[in-house]
Image: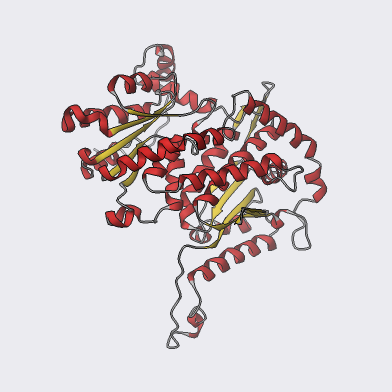
Amino acid sequence: MNDNGRSIITLDYTGMMISAQNSNGFAMEELHGLQNLLEQAQISILSQRDSGKLDFSKLLTSMKAQLHEIIDYSNAVAPNYDNFVVLGIGGSALGPLAVHQALNHYYYNDLPPAERGHRPRFYVMDNIDPVRFNELLQMLDPRKTLFNVISKSGNTSETMAQFLIIRDTLRQVCGDSYAKHIVITTDKEKGNLLPIALQEGYQRFVIPAGIGGRFSELTPVGLLAAAICGIDVKQLLEGALAMDQWIRDSKGVLSNPAQLRASLAYLSYQKGKNISVFMPYADGLKTMADWYAQMWAESLGKRFDRQGRVVNVGQTPVKALGVTDQHSQVQLYVEGPDDKIITFVTVEKFKATREIPVDFDLPEDIQFLGGRTLEELLFAEQKATEYALTLAKRQHQKIILSSLDAYSVGQLLLLLEWETAYMGELLNINTFDQPGVEEGKNGTYALMGRKGYETRKHDIEEYGKTLYILNEKRD
């Protein structure tokens, strides 16, 4: 498919279908057999979207209208800071990091300022390990750093703890001007961060209603970090909008990319493939695999279906990187349990090329590499892995990006979000909640002394009285 001369993502699902080489694939009739379910899923997804309960695709148009505010702010502040630090966790961290790694120089932070377009270095603090946190603060000058605090509710313990430490540090170092070093991304009307931001005068951006963290990359959660670090956020949104239109307008499982991928995932899951491997063949997409893993796991791993029945569903996502993980994981995929579906993500045209030198004095067994390029070697490695899986009758498919640019990455993000939504409908579960995560959050509140959680604290402490522990005792 083509959009104004720009190529759209291509899906190659040959390795999922029955063939002379793969008797373990699906017949075309199996895909068509899901069409009624998919049409019902489409109605359900769009009705949730139109009622405001689900905005991950509807928001794109409104984001496009608001983009000028993000771009204007980013262009104004970027030259004034040496560092931009995201304080967030989950989707608030993985999305911005994935897009940054995909679209900026792989060693962006090590470049001289002029080669970064005088944009700040980029860091994401997505955990609360005290050593890592302290060492980042030791390395950065707070007076030259802008901190982006991201939490829709303002209840995220990890992010709020980081925020309180940073605010205290900035007050000590910057005095009355500390607020200029903090920008808040949170809910428009409620939450704990909002009143603090209003009282203390922080720049503020809004996370739209109906958006969970893992679906928030194409909101200010991700767009602000991208714009500050020089990414073309207009093209990012244009690509997402093009994919959204393709999905909404397509009729039939074979013409709708999200329906097709969800159907293949669902059929494979019904036949015992309870692991989904996401394996890009481009280092720039390495963190995209982390983002996908959260999307797939948190959205689809559910105990109950919509009728309240215990179902315990969900495919386990595994992240891999070609060719690195050909030497660490592929042995298992080819000869281990047949419980996986593998998605390769490839890029047709890389930003740079590198020729391998010719040297006839080398041993004959490696002379064949001379005169070829690293891209050719990468493509050959991916194709060979694909072939090995086919011979082993293991299911695999491929997402092909024409190039690794903002437009293509926008398409990829929306495709995977829509695919997840369709898969949730096919599984008859709520794709957009995360009750298992909430239980852990509530336990943390209790153990840290938050009011109203005293009973839960007591229960956790009682649970911890009986332990089975092995360690080495020394005199």
Task: Examine the image and state in which quarter residue 10 appears.
Answer: bottom right
Please say whether residue 321 is visible from this viewpoint: yes
Q: Position of residue 421 (x, y in %)?
A: 63, 35
Would you place residue 93 above or below residue 333 in this image?
above
Query: Left of 37 or right of it: where is 191?
Result: left
In this rendered view, identify the residue nearer to me: 89 or 413.
413
- Residue lying at 78% horizontally and 59% vertically, measured from the top left: 19
- Residue lying at 63% horizontally and 58% vertically, measured from the top left: 335
Task: Examine the image and state in which quarter residue 195 appears.
Answer: top left
In this rendered view, identify the residue nearer to me: 436 or 250.
250
Would you place residue 167 above or below residue 127 in this image?
above
Query: Left of 414 or right of it: where is 44?
Result: right
Q: Where is residue 228 in the image (x, y as percent from the top left)?
A: 36, 43
Q: Where is residue 163 in the image (x, y as percent from the top left)?
A: 31, 29
Q: Quadrant of the N terminus?
A: bottom right
Please say whether residue 304 is visible from this viewpoint: no
Query: Left of 170 or right of it: where is 20?
Result: right
Would you place residue 453 above or below residue 395 in this image?
above
Q: How is the image coloured?
A: secondary structure
Q: Where is residue 319 in the image (x, y as percent from the top left)?
A: 52, 49
In this rendered view, identify the residue nearer to me: 227 or 298.
227
Task: Examine the image and state in which quarter residue 336 appears.
Answer: bottom right
- Residue lying at 42% horizontally and 17% vertically, measured from the top left: 462
What count of labels does the image hold?
Answer: 0
Q: Quadrant of the C terminus?
A: top left
- Residue lying at 67% horizontally and 37% vertically, measured from the top left: 422
Query: Left of 382 or right of it: where is 182?
Result: left
